[in-house]
Amino acid sequence: METPPQYKFLIVDDSVFARKNMGKVVEMIGGVVAGEATTGREAIDQYFKLKPDVVVMDVSMPEMEGLEALSKIKEQDKDARVIIVSSLGYEELVKKALSLGAKHFIAKPFQPDKAAEIIRFVLKEIK
Amino acid sequence: MEELSSLQLSEEDIKSLKETFYQQAMELIESLIQEVLSLEEKSDKGDSLKTIKRIFHTLKGDSASIGLKELSSLTHKAEDLLQAVEDGSIEVDGDLTDLLLKTADCINGAIELNLTGKDTPLVPVIAEKIGSFLKGRSIEQHAACSYDAPLVLGEYEKLLLAENRKQGKGIYFVRLHFSADCQMKSAGAMIISQHITGIGEVIKASPPLDDREIESAAIIELIIASSMNAEEVRKFCSIPGIVDEVTAEEFQEQGLAIAHKGALEAKGESARQDKLARSTTIRVESERMDQIMDLVGELVIGRSMIARLFSEFEERFPREEMLGRFAYVNSFIERSLSDLQRSVMKLRMVPIDRVFKRFPRVVRDLAKASNKDIKLMIHGQETEVDKGLVDMIGEPLIHILRNAIDHGIETMEEREALGKERQGTISLEAYHQGNDIIIEVKDDGRGIDVKKIKEKALEKGLISKGAMEKMDDKDAIDFIFLPGFSTAKVVSEVSGRGVGMDVVRSVVDGLRGSVRVKTEVGAGTTFMLRFPLTLAIIKALMFSACDRLFAIPLASVKEITRVFVKEVALINGKEVLRMREKVIPLVRLEEVLNLGSRSRKMDKLFVVIVSIEDKDIGIAVNKLVGEEELVIKSVTDQWVNTNIVGGASILGNGQVVLILNPLVLIKKAGERAVNDELLAANSGQ
């Protein structure tokens, strides 16, 4: 990838490790983590405050508002780019998220380079 | 596949697609039922199972395309069920066929209801049933089956394809290899689908992108319409994390069809496919056909106008040189027109199988309900009959079948005691005889006890005791066609309160047909229905009576005779004729049609003897006009409020001819010249 403009990311996950891990991936592709959130509610707040280019969000959070957050975000900003992260076995959830307008999904556990590829793929849409 | 609503289709297109879907679905359900029923009989069930599965598969895809999600998921479940049967983890037995039949009914109902915009609550119920059937009966899960449905385009997809081609879009055959690390293939498929929607349209996918089979697929084959070129499409379809390898090439229908034909033949399914191909015909609304038929009728009239003009011309200018050329052109038109007429008539002809194929199911269900074992044999289902007949004949036939099952065939125990086979047999047969089509329903049951019928008729005051004793069995059986006449001692659930046979009669009358019953106590009953081959054009004998022109179907005319007025005898004030061994009623049209007496006094008169099912009447006529092929138009005129006139036709000279219904005339004559006296006279021979 040629050096792209610095894209802003919002990472939503209840696990610190997961957020860190994903943060690394974001840096790998030259993005910047503009903010983090641990719940769906936080995610919504952060999204409208930070206006990130991409949201990377775990939908299988315990406080299950991932989907709700996603639909709220899409409701108010239909161009929002949300990438879903999910553990295996939550396929229905992922499909639901996709039907709500998520752009892509990353299955946990993921290899960073593969995840990076997916994020790049989503970023390609931004012209 | 996208829902219709999201396509760039006009409402009319959507409507016509829905119509197509509906018609195809109905046909599929019919063959589904047939195959399920044949499962119970055949020893080698492999082919039927395959066909059933394929039908469910098609229904699944189509209903998804049309937006009937619930139905699509129901058919999907049914497909799973069939897979389990094919794998041998579920056995074919009565429970399975019951469930499959229920599923067929449910799909049928759901589709019909959906057309009226309603949802059916039954769909999830049946889906649930299939689910629990699978769970309860399946020995092993069939998770690891690979998907091998060929990428064959259905009607709907072909339409989409054509639509896209029209818009100048490229059609591509795309093969996607799932990445090894794609763990959620069905979610992946969703992304593929969403992604492609951004550049075009998925016309067909194998396995379907919303299909559970996706999980076990390594490759997805797609047909995509897009304004991009093949290379762009290929690049676009490389989706990291989901798709590793992509090939995209211009789609050629021919190549695919041939490739898959080979594949199908290898699977031994070519026969089925051929069958499908053969049934791929043009569907035309019957209204349009009727319109053409009407127009042909008009043309026939127009031609006979020309013929009349021509003969007038010939009379006036017998030396005219152009006469020969006129004659040539006239006969040319006549020939072409009669060819046209025949061709159009053929258009109206459909195999009677359309009605017959419903019956195995009907008989099976009714037999089950009345706890009898009955085999239905069908012959001559390929016999071609008028579409109008096919539309109308179903109901009366069902009434007859119901009666045969309910009252005709004995219980298994009774049959055994009588030394008959435990299994009763009903045979249904159609065949041509001259200008008629005959439909026979025959059972090997207990037959109709004519004595009981006579008693009942007496009890109901339909006949006098004296007449009853002389009445022959053939006439007595006809009582069953009277409304409310039933000899069934126990009113059963199956044939209700004996209503039905009067329906049979009235429908048959309406179709200008006749029905005859042959019965033998202990051996069975045969209903023989006879109809004219075509309902639109008849060969008729024309005659005038009381200064009006009438016609009567030639098929019913037995003979024409001239009698002296003094030969007409009076019995109880009614005129009768002595014809050889028989006394037959003489009908004067001015009387039955209440036209007022206008016939001139003559000492000799023409009598047309009309005969149906061995019952004769004579119609007094003034003058015979001739035979002609008449295009029947229905009569809605207020003054023709009698069913004696079955229709009308317009002749070349613009004259209107009324077509008489011989059956009604015979009945009327019977009423007038009360049976008693006639019978007395006849037996006095």
Image: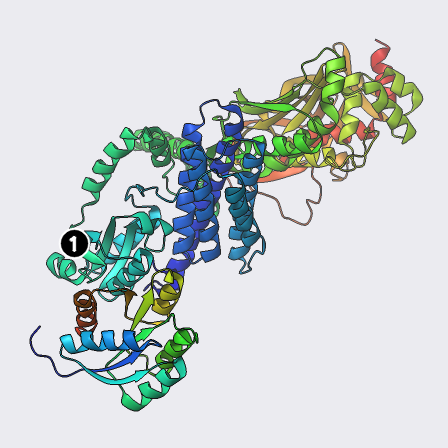
B519 left or right of B460? Answer: left
B527 left or right of B117? Answer: right
The amino acid type, in three-letter code, at marker 1 is Val
User: Residue A62, image x and y in percent?
Assistant: 42, 73
- Judging depth in this view, the residue of B422 and A83 nearest the camera is A83
Quarter of the image holding residue B414?
top right
Q: Is residue B309 above or below residue A36?
A: above
- Judging depth in this view, the residue of B194 and B64 nearest the camera is B194
| Extreme residue toward the bottom, this view | A49
User: Residue B564, image x and y in percent?
Assistant: 75, 17
Q: Is residue B389 visible?
A: no
Residue pictured at 37% horizontal, 85% vertical: A42
Residue pictured at 16% horizontal, 67% vertical: A113
The image quadrant where one finds the N terminus of chain B is bottom left
Residue pictured at 64% horizontal, 48% vertical: B637
Instruction: Identify the residue position indicated by label 1 in the image.
Output: B246
The image quadrant where one finds the C terminus of chain B is top right
User: Residue B608, image x and y in percent?
Assistant: 67, 22
Check disc 1 and report its element: helix, strand or loop.
strand
Q: Is residue B16 above or below residue A52?
A: above
User: Residue B20, image x and y in percent?
Assistant: 41, 49
Q: Is residue B655 above or below residue B439?
A: below
- Judging depth in this view, the residue of B287 and B306 nearest the camera is B287
Residue pictured at 37% horizontal, 76% vertical: A70
The colour style of the image is: rainbow
Q: Chain of mark 1?
A: B
- Judging depth in this view, the residue of B588 and B205 nearest the camera is B205
Q: Is residue A51 visible?
A: yes
Quarter of the image holding residue A92?
bottom left
B469 left or right of A92? Answer: right
